[in-house]
Amino acid sequence: SQKIEQNSEALNIQEGKTATLTCNYTNYSPAYLQWYRQDPGRGPVFLLLIRENEKEKRKERLKVTFDTTLKQSLFHITASQPADSATYLCARGEGGYSTLTFGKGTMLLVSP
Amino acid sequence: SQTIHQWPATLVQPVGSPLSLECTVEGTSNPNLYWYRQAAGRGLQLLFYSVGIGQISSEVPQNLSASRPQDRQFILSSKKLLLSDSGFYLCAWSNSGSPDTQYFGPGTRLTVL
């Protein structure tokens, strides 16, 4: 089965620094990877999607990379703020009418 | 714009009791619909998904069932709840033509005692 692995340990960083979260996948490369943000007691919110043939995607302070050699996606938040504190989920999709496989998420804590 | 509703927001049920959680989507037609469960410390587990009325695919065998009586309505049910059914239940939808991105509802926190 296809797996998504995210660091289960929380990432603590200081406000203003760049946060980098890692998502590793197994077996073959997915058609795309997605990143979601989840606040406690809330449903996940979609942030970014990057396709297999894309190296990098940006949206405001967010940047996602897709490295098919390392089987890895990196999610960056530049100039992080305490409001960025949340759990970030990575998901792989196979395209077509397939479903998503989610990782367990990594909690990010940004301190003032 | 599209919105997704789930109710109830929280639910406390005794073991062996029935369950019915409802999800409705507004502002879109023929969406793909999904039910997930998120247990404490665990990831999102896909339970069921549907690509159309009456079409249900089950990902994990269990004592839960799902139904889609209308295009934008998705219901999660159980005849007899188990302690292990406790968790955070999330409904999500995606466009049928481009199922890449999923949009989640606010969730239902279920506690089985």
Image: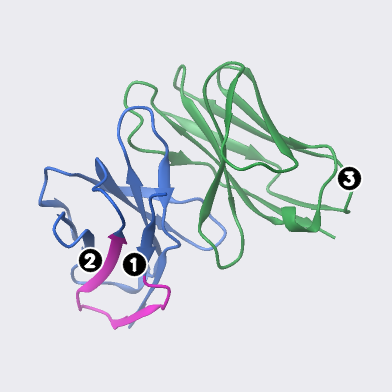
Chain colours: A blue, B green
What label sits on residue A84 in the rendered view?
Answer: 1
Pick the front one: B5 or A31: A31
Q: From the image, state whether disc 2 or disc 1 is nearer to you.
A: 2
Residue type indicated by callout 2: Ile
Asked if the residue under mark 1 is in contact with the one under mark 2, i.e. CB atoms within 8 Å, the reply is: yes
Asked if the residue under mark 1 is in contact with the one under mark 3, i.e. CB atoms within 8 Å, the reply is: no
Element under disc 1: helix
What label sits on residue B17 in the rendered view?
Answer: 3
Element under disc 2: strand
Residue appearing at x 39%, y 55% in the figure = A3
Residue A96 sits in quarter = top left
**Residue highlighted by disc 2:** A77
Residue B84 sits in quarter = bottom right
Q: Would you call the spot at circle 3 few (<14 residues within 10 Å), some (14-19), or many (20 or more)? A: few
Residue type indicated by callout 3: Ser
Q: How far apart are marks 2 and 3 (CA)?
A: 45 Å
Q: Would you call the spot at circle 2 few (<14 residues within 10 Å), some (14-19), or many (20 or more)? A: some
Asked if the residue under mark 3 is in contact with the one under mark 2, i.e. CB atoms within 8 Å, the reply is: no
Q: Is residue B103 left or right of residue B61?
A: left
Q: From the image, state whether disc 2 or disc 3 is nearer to you.
A: 3
